[in-house]
Image (cartoon, coloured by chain):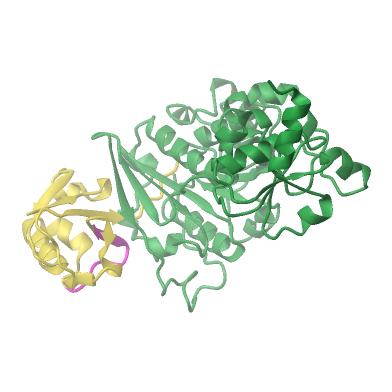
Chain colours: A green, B yellow
Amino acid sequence: MASYRELLQQTKAEVEEVDAREAQELDGAVWVDVRRHDEWDEGYIPGAIHIPRGSLESRIESRVPDRTAPVVLYCATGERSAFAAKSLAELGYERPVSLAGGFVDWKRNGREITLPRSLSPERRARYSRHILIPEIGEEGQLKLLDSRILLLGAGGLGSPAALYLAAAGVGHIGIVDADIVDESNLQRQIAHSLNTLGSPKVDSAKRTIEALNPDVEVTTYRERLTSENIDAILDDGWEIIVDGADNFPTRYLLNDASVWRGIPIVHGSIYRFEGQVTVFDPHAGPCYRCLFPEPPPVELAPSCSEGGVLGVLPGIVGTLQTNEALKLALGIGDPLVGRLLLFDALATEFHEVHVNRNPNCPVCGENPTITEYVDYVEFCAR
Amino acid sequence: MSVVRVPPVLREEAGGARQVEATGTTVRELLEDLAGRLPALGAKVYDGADIRPYVNVYVDGEDVRTSGGLDAPVRENATVVLLPAMAGGR
């Protein structure tokens, strides 16, 4: 039976050990830190990914799918990483190497390290169900806390979006809405309540968000989006826009601005029992004008106040929009780019149609004809 | 025979139906057949020469404007979606 020392010596003889300079010269190498979480929290080698030794074999294939790339493994002193290198060789990795002297030598020699940002224990508890998902983890949660999402409208679609984005820990939420809360809103606009009847919707939604999650910083714009104010609002650095507007002029205005600024829009609209959801990602997919080049005539554009809407429908459509917004913020999954999802609440049916980029699109096409904001006449008020 | 899904804003023109039937081996034939059966609905979608600019027509999930236009073939039992823009969000 071998002692630990003997086993270590034997393993080191079987794997390739490199010093820091040799490791840095390995072209296309992936650096993997195999230390414990608490060791990683005190700093790591820039660019390294973290897979603790205990879960290396189970997680390496998803994090480093390319078995031909060199993999530089390091721990504190070069012992655990020697065993790790041996395991990767057994898994078919062509060139796993162990960093001699590990992180301790790296740091002692004055080489650069990165101090990771990490969540406070309170935040780890609050977002634990996100952190448990491999696609999100602590890194993803930090991304959400850094992200800036603008809600156009704090009504039927904006309400569920505000609540779920806030609960998810999106750190900065902007809300644009000029209206005040009235009784007819409460059938579906769940960010508001009897306590805020008569208050501006932006203030009411802000109160609701703050009661749910103090991590969220809310910026309110108690105004209607116009060609006059849109640039000032978007200059605040919003990265994703959830469009829950209730009229065509605003939707076209927002579309044109988002194309020119490269900000993705998560689009949702509702009428009676039916909803539509899609993502307009400028230049990567179609824009609203590729889908509908111009607004329809007045008789084809009824508003909710004329047409009515099943109260839960904006809840369904608004949460689908929120799902897309969170995926965009996290950079995961397949967003609804180039796909328009149609939902029929009466049949409980989803239907999807393809939306292609229009090369002749007046805004995002090859020869755009619209280069400044268009103020359409307001024909679909509430 | 294809199934044409009628959007909520056009249901009045279809006598309240959520879906109607129409036949045709091309998009043009299908829309002309639809206009013959339900003239009010047909007129909102098709002006006799072209699809109206604010309505999209999808055959089996593809927008006919970018996949062959009015002469594009329509298979038997296709699903046709008529889609005018909706703006409601409140």
**Quarter of the image where one finds residue A228:** bottom right
Does residue A320 appear left or right of residue B77 in this picture?
right
Residue shown at the point (93%, 47%) measured from the top left: A110
Q: Position of residue A264 (x, y in %)?
A: 54, 54
Task: In the displayed orientation, state which residue is furthest to the bottom.
Answer: A367
Quadrant of the image containing the C terminus of chain A: top left
Image label count: 0
Q: Position of residue A160 (x, y in %)?
A: 50, 33
Residue shown at the point (15%, 67%) measured from the top left: B73
**In magenta stretch: residue A381:** no
Q: Position of residue A99 (x, y in %)?
A: 78, 44
Task: In the displayed orientation, state which residue is furthest to the front.
Answer: A1
Residue shown at the point (34%, 32%) measured from the top left: A310
**Viewer-side residue, A53 vs A296:** A53
**In magenta stretch: residue B53:** yes
Magenta region? B49-58
- What secondary structure predominates along the stretch shown in magenta? loop
**Viewer-side residue, A328 vs A320:** A328
Residue A381 vertical position relative to residue A124 in the rendered view, above or below: below
Residue A293 vertical position relative to residue B61 in the rendered view, above or below: below
**Quarter of the image where one finds residue A205:** top right
Residue B58 vertical position relative to residue A162 in the rendered view, above or below: below
Q: Is residue A200 visible?
A: no
**Viewer-side residue, A198 vs A157:** A157
Q: Is residue B24 visible?
A: yes
Does residue A366 appear left or right of residue A342 in this picture?
right
Quadrant of the image containing the N terminus of chain A: top right
**Viewer-side residue, A300 vs A338:** A338
Residue A362 vertical position relative to residue A118 in the rendered view, above or below: below
Q: Position of residue A185 (x, y in %)?
A: 47, 31
